[in-house]
Structures are given as C-alpha cells and as structure tokens.
C-alpha cells in the first residue's frame, strides 16, 4: 500500500477541529487527526467547544452526568483563554492536558491545568469566568457550522462540518489517511448528512 506524503507544492487541506478536552470520543478523533498530519497535507485549526454549554438546561440528564458537565466547565474556559491569547499553543495544550485526563486517567482538572500551563510556558492565573463569553462564541461557531443536536467533536473539512467521525480506536499510518480521504469525499457531497450505527465498545486510547 502506497503512503501519501505531503506535497509542499499543493495547498494544504484545511481542517477545523472543535473539541471539549474532557470528551473521550473527541480525544480519540483528535488523535486520529494527529496521525493524519503524518500522511496527508493538512492544516489543522483547533477550536474549543463545551459539553457544559451544550447540555445547559437539560434537566432530564442523570445527576452524575450533570456533575461531569459542571466539572468540564473549567477546562473549557481555560481552552477559550488559550485560543484567544495564544492560539498557536492550543493544539499542544490539548495534547498535553488530554493525555493526562484520558491516557493517565487523572480527573483533578485544576491541578492538571496548572501543571500543563507550567510545562508549556503558559502564564497561570486570571479568573477563568472572564472567558465564558469567548467560550460561548467558540462553541457557537461549531453549532453554526454543523447545526443542532450534535455533540463533540465537530470536524470541519473545507466548507462542510460533521459531528464526528465518532471512532473508538485510533487509526494509524495509512489507515488514518484513508479514513480522512473518505471523510473529505463525503464532505464534498452537498446531499450527504449522516451515517450512524450503535457503538459496541468504549473509546480505547492506546489501541
């Protein structure tokens, strides 16, 4: 199987990736995109969205899920701050913080955020609440791109955005590239809207 390599003579495929750092499905999909960067000529823009904002006012949700949504608020606010003040560091921050949360299973978000800022040389401090308006604007950008009744991640290929792809294992190498090619091809069809089937396993980050 031939591996596609990046070609500097061709313009890069634009990919806009909206994520909530606490979401395990977004994490798997984001790691797929990182694999795609190795085998395709793409330019990724990382943009925060928020499960906390997405689920506001949904009183029917189970109590434990509501607590998870409350906990997800702080990391999303911090992502909005970095996306505003140092957008060039957002992808690396997502990778570093997401690895701690998902691969290492650490859910002490305040401590993890401080540690990750220190690792990447990002100034700590400030009131996270000050970034709520910015977070809501970033989040609304995802909703405007894809529509209502979606979750995270939202991935935009060119002018078309989808919720997903929702995957539970990370494709590697050319497998990652082929899934990307298929996603772009679907996005090129103006009449394609949805594929879905029941999930039979939880996300596996190291598979």
Image (cartoon, rainbow, N blue to C red):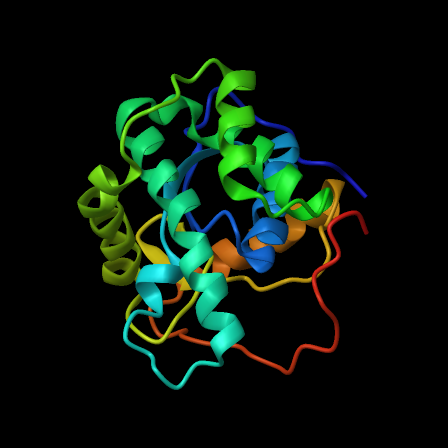
How many numbered marks does the figure carry? 0
Q: Quadrant of residue 123?
A: top left
The residue that appears at 41% across and 60% down in the rendered structure is 70
Q: Is residue 107 left or right of residue 125?
A: right
138 sits left or right of 25 in the view: left
Out of 66 and 22, give the one closest to the viewer.
66
Residue drawn 39% across and 45% down? 74
Q: Position of residue 80 (x, y in %)?
A: 31, 39
Instruction: Judge whether 19 appears above or below 46 on screen.
Output: below
Query: Measured along the vertical axis of the image, is residue 205 above or below residue 43?
Result: below
Q: Give the image location of residue 93, x and y in percent.
A: 50, 29
Location of the N terminus by quadrant is top right
Measuring from the top left, give residue 156's x and y in whole percent. 39, 52
| Residue 84 can be seen, yes or no | yes
Q: Kindly identify the residue that appears in the image at 33 percent across and 79 percent down.
A: 58
Q: Is 22 situated left or right of 85 in this image?
A: right
Q: Is residue 120 above or below residue 95?
A: above
Residue 163 can be seen in this image: no
Residue furthest out toward the top = 121
Front-most of 173 and 201? 201
Residue occupying the point 18% across, 46% down: 133
Q: Position of residue 17 (x, y in %)?
A: 43, 46
């Amino acid at each position: 199987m031939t591996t596609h390599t990046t070609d500097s003579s061709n313009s890069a495929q634009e990919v806009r990736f909206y994520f909530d750092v606490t979401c395990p499905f977004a994490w798997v999909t984001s790691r797929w995109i990182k694999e795609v960067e190795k085998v395709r000529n793409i330019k990724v823009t990382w943009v925060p969205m928020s499960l906390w904002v997405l689920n506001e006012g949904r009183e029917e949700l189970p109590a434990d899920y509501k607590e998870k949504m409350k906990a997800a608020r702080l990391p999303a606010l911090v992502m909005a701050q970095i996306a505003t003040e140092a957008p060039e560091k957002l992808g690396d921050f997502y990778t570093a913080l997401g690895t701690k949360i998902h691969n290492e299973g650490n859910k002490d978000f305040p401590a993890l955020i401080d540690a990750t800022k220190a690792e990447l040389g990002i100034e700590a401090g400030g009131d996270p609440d000050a970034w709520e308006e910015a977070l809501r604007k970033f989040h609304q950008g995802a909703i405007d791109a894809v529509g209502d009744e979606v979750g995270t991640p939202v991935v935009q290929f060119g002018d078309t955005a989808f919720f997903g792809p929702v995957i539970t294992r990370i494709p590697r190498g050319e497998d990652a590239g082929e899934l990307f090619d298929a996603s772009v091809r679907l996005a090129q069809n103006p009449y394609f809207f949805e594929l879905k089937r029941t999930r039979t396993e939880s996300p596996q980050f190291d598979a």
